[in-house]
Image: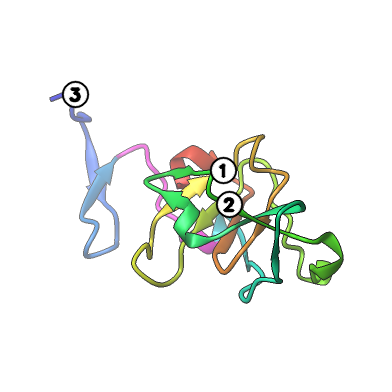
Amino acid sequence: MKFKPNPKYKPSGVEWLGDVPEHWNVKRLKHLGSSRYGLGEPPEYVDDGIPFVRATDINRGKIDLEAVKKVRAEDVPWNRKPLLNLDEILVVRSGAYTGDSAIVSPSVAVCIAGYDMVFSVKSAHPQFVA
C-alpha cells in the first residue's frame, strides 16, 4: 500500500461513498465552481487557426495537442465563451470517452472547447476536483 490509511473516519452522508477521512468536507460539485458547455457543433476545420479541443483529444487526464483540429476565429461564436482558461477542467460528456477529464494546462489555455463540459473551480484545488 502506497499511502497509510487515515486514523479517523466519519460517515460522508452519501450512501455510495461511505466513510471519509474525518478532516474532509463533503460538498456537492456545484458548490466548488461553475460549469459551461463548449461549442457543440464545430465550425469548419482549417489548416491554420485556433485549436479546437474535441472529446477524442482527451485521453486519461491529458489533452493531445498534436491531434487537435483548428477553426477560423471569425467562425467562432464568441458569445458562448468557448476559450479555455488555465486550471479549468474539461469533461467529456458523451460517447466512448464519457467521463474522461483533463485539466487545462498553459499550452491548452489558447484553445477553445468543443462539445465537452468545462468546469471552473472556484473554491478547491483543480487537481483534487479532477
User: Of residues 33 and 50, which is closer to you in this image?
Assistant: 50
The residue carrying pointer 1 sits among few (fewer than 14), some (14 to 19) or many (20 or more) residues within 10 Å by Cα, namely some
* Quarter of the rendering containing residue 33: bottom right
* Quarter of the rendering containing residue 125: top right
Image location (x, y in percent) of residue 76: 79, 67
Q: Amino acid at mark 1?
A: Leu
Q: Which mark is residue 68?
A: 2
Magenta region:
22-30
Extreme left residue here? 1
Residue shown at 45%/58% (left/top)?
56
What residue is shown with label 1? 65
Q: Amino acid at mark 3?
A: Lys
Alpha carbon of mark 2 to alpha carbon of mark 3: how far? 40 Å
Left or right of 53, for residue 97: left
Q: Element under label 3?
A: loop
**Disc 1 and disc 2 in contact, CB within 8 angstroms:** yes
**Disc 2 and disc 3 in contact, CB within 8 angstroms:** no
Q: Amino acid at mark 2?
A: Val
Residue shown at 22%/34% (left/top)?
8
Residue shown at 57%/69% (left/top)?
115
Instruction: Specify whether residue 119 is painted magenta.
Output: no
Image location (x, y in percent) of residue 120: 63, 53
Majority SS type along the magenta span: loop
Q: Which mark is residue 4?
A: 3
User: Of residues 128 and 87, which is closer to you in this image?
Assistant: 87
Alpha carbon of mark 1 to alpha carbon of mark 3: how far? 37 Å
- Quadrant showing the N terminus: top left
Left or right of 14, for residue 98: right
User: Of residues 10 and 90, which is closer to you in this image?
Assistant: 90
